[in-house]
Image: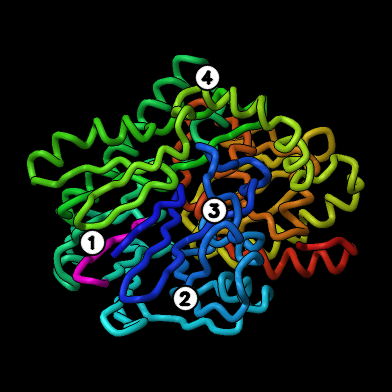
C-alpha cells in the first residue's frame, strides 16, 4: 500500500492495483468563507492528482466532501459512504449528478477489488460522521477524520477488524468557542488552554484505544486568513508538533511509532514516511500564517466576498418574516430534545433586528420579537450572515466552525447543550430551500 497525504483529512491510496481518494478538499474557503487550506496545498485541485478508481466520504462537512470539491471529480466515479439519517450527503451527491454511489451499513466490510476492503465505523454517540478502515496489500489503515471515539469504541474497531498498522487520528476540534465568547483576556486564555487540552486527549484516546503500530495526527491543515481573524489561529487548538509532543508518553508506553506528515508526504510499510518537502517554509505559527495571508490577500478577499451575503441584501421586515418561519419549524421539530430546558436566548442581526427564544420546562418553546433583558445567552451575526443561514445551504455548523458567531453569556448562566444540539443537528437544508424559493434567491 502506498499512501499520499494530501493535507487535512485527504488521502490518496494505491493498493490492490486500484486507487482511492478519501475525504477530498480542493475548493476553498469553507465554513462561511472562513477556512483556507494551510500549509499551502501542493495539489491545489483535482486535476493535479491522478484519477481515482474509488471515492470514500466520511461525512458532509465541506472540508471533507464539499460540493465545489466534488464537482471537480468524474460523476461516474464509484463512491462509498454511510447512509446518514438526515439524507444531506445523499442530496448533495444527487444534486451534483453522481451516478455510482453505494451506501454501506456501519461495520459492513465491502471488497472494492480482490484483497482491497473498506469498512465504515460509526460514531459511538450518534453524530453524522464516520471513520474508515481500509485494508489492502497486507496493511490495515484507520482513517479517523472528524470521528473522535471513546477508548472503548476504538477498542471495538480492533476487536471487530484486527490490529491497525497505521492510524490517522484527529486532534484539533474547531468552533466559535472560546474565541467567539465574551470575556476578558485571562478568561479567554484559560478557555483556550482547556480546549487545547481536549485536543491532546482526543489524540491520546485514539492511541490508547487502537494501539496502532504507527499513528499520525491529522485533519487540521487549515487556517483563518481573514485579517481580523488571524489572531485565532492555534490559540485554541494544538499545532501538529504540539500534538506529537503531547502524545509521546502514551505512544512510548504502548510501543506506537508516531509519524509526522506534511501535505504531499508519502508512506509505505517498507519505507515509512517519505518527506517530500512540498510545504517547506510554512510553519504552524502566527508569523508564517500572517505572511501567507499577506501573500494571498487579493485572492482571500475575493473568495470571502463570494460567501458573505451583503448586509443590505434583505430588508429588516423580510428578514423578520423569514426568521419566524425558520425557527418556528425548527422549534417544533426539536421540541422533544429541548423539553427540559429553562433558557432564554437572544438572537441579534447586527444593525437590523433581534428576537428571543424562550424555553420553559413543560411548555412549548416560543419565539418573540425583541430581547427580554433576561437572556442567558445572546447570539450575534451580521444581517447578511443571517440571510445566508435562512435561505442558502449555509448552516449553523458554518458559522460555528467558521468562527463567525459571537456569543454573550449571562454571568452565572449554565451549559445548555440541548440548545446547541438543536442548532447544530437540525437538518435545515430543505427548509432553507423552501425559503430561498419563496424569496427568489439562490440556495446554492
Say which of 161 and 148 sits in front. Answer: 161
Mark 2 or mark 3, whichever is nearer to me: 2
Q: Which mark is residue 53?
A: 2
Q: Secondary structure at mark 2?
A: loop
Say which of 345 and 1 sits in front. Answer: 1
Q: Is residue 364 visible?
A: no
Mark 4 or mark 2, whichever is nearer to me: 2
Q: Is residue 257 magenta?
A: no
Separation of residues labelled 4 and 1 (CA atoms): 39 Å
Disc 3 target residue: 63
Image: magenta residue range: 136-144
Q: Earlier in the sequence, mark 3 or mark 4?
A: 3
Q: Which residue does the image show at 47% across and 36% down from the upper left? A: 279
Answer with left or right where residue 51 lies relative to residue 327: left
Separation of residues labelled 3 and 4 (CA atoms): 24 Å
Residue 61: where, in percent of width, then height? 54, 57
Q: Secondary structure at mark 4?
A: helix
Mark 3 or mark 4, whichever is nearer to me: 4
Q: Tally the numbered discs.
A: 4
Labels 4 & 2 near each other (Cβ < 8 A): no
Labels 2 & 3 near each other (Cβ < 8 A): no
Q: Secondary structure at mark 3?
A: helix
Labels 1 & 2 near each other (Cβ < 8 A): no
Q: Secondary structure at mark 1?
A: helix
Dot 4 surroundings within 10 Å: few (below 14), some, or many (20 or more)?
few
Disc 1 target residue: 153
**For residue 259, which quarter of the picture?**
top left
Amino acid at each position: 500500500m502506498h499512501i499520499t497525504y494530501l493535507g487535512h483529512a485527504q488521502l490518496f491510496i494505491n493498493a490492490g492495483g486500484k486507487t482511492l481518494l478519501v475525504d477530498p478538499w480542493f475548493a476553498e474557503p469553507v465554513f462561511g468563507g472562513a477556512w483556507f487550506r494551510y500549509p499551502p496545498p501542493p495539489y491545489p485541485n483535482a486535476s493535479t492528482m491522478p484519477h481515482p478508481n474509488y471515492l470514500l466520504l466520511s461525512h458532509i462537512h465541506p472540508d471533507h466532501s464539499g460540493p465545489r470539491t466534488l464537482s471537480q471529480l468524474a460523476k461516474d466515479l464509484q463512491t462509498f459512504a454511510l447512509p446518514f439519517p438526515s439524507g444531506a450527503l445523499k442530496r448533495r451527491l444527487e444534486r451534483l449528478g453522481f451516478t455510482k454511489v453505494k451506501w454501506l451499513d456501519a461495520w459492513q466490510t465491502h471488497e472494492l477489488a480482490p484483497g482491497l476492503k473498506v469498512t465504515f465505523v460509526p460514531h459511538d454517540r450518534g453524530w453524522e460522521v464516520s471513520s474508515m478502515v481500509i485494508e489492502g496489500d497486507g496493511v490495515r489503515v484507520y482513517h479517523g477524520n472528524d470521528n473522535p471515539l471513546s477508548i472503548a469504541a476504538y477498542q471495538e474497531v480492533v476487536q471487530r477488524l484486527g490490529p491497525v498498522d497505521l492510524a490517522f487520528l484527529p486532534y484539533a476540534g474547531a468552533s466559535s468557542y472560546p474565541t467567539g465568547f465574551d470575556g476578558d483576556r485571562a478568561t479567554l486564555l484559560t478557555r483556550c488552554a482547556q480546549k487545547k487540552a481536549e485536543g491532546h486527549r482526543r489524540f491520546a484516546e485514539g492511541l490508547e484505544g487502537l494501539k496502532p503500530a504507527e499513528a499520525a495526527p491529522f485533519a487540521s491543515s487549515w487556517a483563518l486568513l481573514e485579517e481580523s481573524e488571524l489572531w485565532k489561529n492555534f490559540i485554541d487548538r494544538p499545532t501538529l508538533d504540539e500534538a506529537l509532543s503531547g502524545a509521546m508518553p502514551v505512544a512510548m508506553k504502548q510501543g506506537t511509532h508516531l509519524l509526522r506528515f506534511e501535505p504531499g508526504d508519502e508512506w509505505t510499510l517498507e519505507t515509512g514516511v517519505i518527506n517530500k518537502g512540498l510545504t517547506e517554509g510554512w510553519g504552524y505559527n502566527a508569523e508564517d500564517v500572517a505572511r501567507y495571508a499577506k501573500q494571498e490577500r487579493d485572492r482571500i478577499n475575493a473568495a470571502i466576498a463570494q460567501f458573505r451575503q451583503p448586509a443590505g441584501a434583505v430588508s429588516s421586515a423580510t428578514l423578520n418574516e423569514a426568521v419566524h418561519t425558520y425557527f418556528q419549524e425548527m422549534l417544533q421539530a426539536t421540541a422533544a430534545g429541548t423539553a427540559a430546558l429553562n433558557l432564554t436566548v437572544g438572537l441579534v442581526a447586527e444593525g437590523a433586528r433581534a428576537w428571543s427564544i424562550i424555553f420553559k420546562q413543560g411548555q412549548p418553546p416560543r419565539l418573540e420579537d425583541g430581547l427580554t433583558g433576561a437572556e442567558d445567552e445572546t447570539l450575534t451575526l451580521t444581517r447578511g450572515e443571517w440571510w445566508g443561514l435562512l435561505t442558502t445551504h449555509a448552516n449553523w455548523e458554518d458559522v460555528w466552525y467558521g468562527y463567525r458567531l459571537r456569543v454573550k453569556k449571562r454571568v452565572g448562566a449554565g451549559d445548555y447543550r440541548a440548545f446547541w444540539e438543536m442548532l447544530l443537528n437540525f437538518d435545515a437544508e430543505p427548509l432553507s430551500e423552501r425559503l430561498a424559493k419563496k424569496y427568489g434567491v439562490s440556495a446554492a
